Amino acid sequence: MAPTTPTPAFGLTRPRNTPLDPPPLFSELRERSPLTRVFLRDGLSPWLVTRWEDARAVLGSPVFSVDPSHPEAPNLRAGQEQRPRGFFLTHDAPVHTMMRRTLTREFMVKRVDALRPAITRLTDELLTVMSGLSGPVDLVEHFSLPLPSLVICELLGVPYEDHAFFQEQSKTLVDRTATADETSLAFANLADFLLGLVQAKRLTPGDDVLTRLTVQADEEIITDQDVADLGALLLIAGHETTANMIALSTVTLLQHPQQIPRLFGGPDQVAVAVEELLRYLTIVHFGLRRTALEDVTVGDVTIRAGEGVIISINVANRDPKSFTDPDDLDLARANARRHIAFGYGVHQCLGQPLARAELQIVLPELFRRLPGLKLAVPEKGIAFKQTTAVYGVDELPVTW
Ligand code: HEM
């Protein structure tokens, strides 16, 4: 039975023993008390879910709401009450269903596969420039951040010249230490910028997502503001995550050099390797947030209507009941694709075919072009981002 008294003074920013493994306390809880109540600094005491099976049960159930305005919603950061409907990640059905539907075609595997040549070209261009530089080079600045930014810009039809501006805004939006005012301002800036682009697309249409969304606005399926908000959501979700996955995958692969050849074993082996990296790193590390709409039993615990739940997907993805030797990286792991690094259920990551395509192209190419790739600083010298919703690094000095 899970304890009824909350685990005292529980902070979600517990130090990690090793940078690429979840904090040990969470793994202990998964074994000892897989559904437990935790105290947060804001006085709330939501349930913490740490087992893979329970995580899927919660994320797959319509009894749990993503709406951050529930009184006991365990929100990750301030200012979440400001949430236009285009930011559908924070809405339940029917708004979520309607808004997500406007984009489903854009992220279908077939549509994303058509982007592979462009992703390959951009990867090649960035690596050509980077490999011409001498001395330690920051992989984040020269490769892992610009690549997904360029791809999402091309897909959306956003000028890449504005990347410094929108990267700054999305940095604030994923920083859980940002104040409500800072968050609101960053979101408003981004939405205004995109609203300007909607008008531009009417004058000069392109073969891109913003143009196609603008057509949906002209047909009165959605409004111009929705188009801007949907665009802002994609810009934020579309580069910060993949950028950190590329950088952290590089660190992980350099720690396991004997497994790097799996990247050169053809598309099936690369696909499995990427799933394993997604599982092992699970960069959305503060957990997904939900509130129960009715009393519901998960495992052997009853969660009452109105109570909050944090689903710790990084700990669930290391559950020994679901993955053999879960703390080991095994790029040939047969069931790696069962991971929930992209979430699960109706809110499961919309951009996952794109993220997969990028990682499957980028990682083999990086190690093929730079076979001598290594860290330019001792691993202890790498500053891992502790306060952002997405785990990662701001810089990664490398040489080859
Ligand atoms: C490796 C990269 C990525 C990871 C690990 C990741 C992870 C996630 C996770 C865990 C969720 C679920 C959130 C929840 O249930 O509360 C999610 C949702 C979402 N992601 Fe991703 N993501 C990645 C890349 C992308 C990309 C490239 C895009 C778009 C271009 C994207 C767009 C979205 C959107 C729009 C949602 C909201 C889906 C919904 O609520 O229906 N993501 N992502």
Image: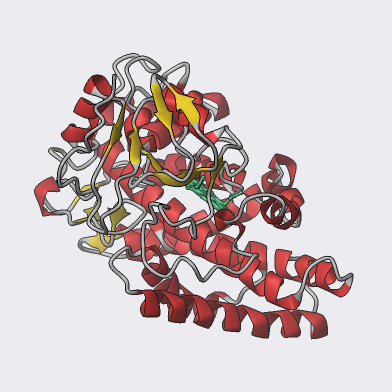
| Residue shown at 27% from the left, 43% from the top | 251
Q: Relative to 46, is 264 above or below?
A: above
Quadrant the N terminus occupies: top left
The picture places residue 307, in percent across and down from the top left corner, at 42, 43
The picture places residue 296, in percent across and down from the top left corner, at 50, 30
Residue 40 vs residue 257, the one in the foreground? 40
Can residue 63 be seen in the rendering of this structure?
Answer: yes
Outermost residue, right direction?
Answer: 219
| Residue shown at 57% from the left, 51% from the top | 120
Q: Relative to 399, is 343 above or below?
A: above
Task: Please give left or right for residue 7 compared with residue 84 in the image.
Answer: left
Residue 8 vs residue 236, the one in the foreground? 8
Residue 87 vs residue 301, the one in the foreground? 301
The picture places residue 326, in percent across and down from the top left corner, at 31, 21
Q: Relative to 345, is 326 above or below?
A: above
Task: Please give left or right for residue 253 compared with residue 190 in the image.
Answer: left
| Residue shown at 79% from the left, 66% from the top | 212
The picture places residue 392, in percent across and down from the top left corner, at 30, 52
Residue 367 vs residue 338, the one in the foreground? 338
Can residue 132 be seen in the rendering of this structure?
Answer: no
Image quadrant where residue 318 sits: top left
| Residue shown at 11% from the left, 54% from the top | 381
Task: Please give left or right for residue 356 compared with residue 283 in the image.
Answer: right
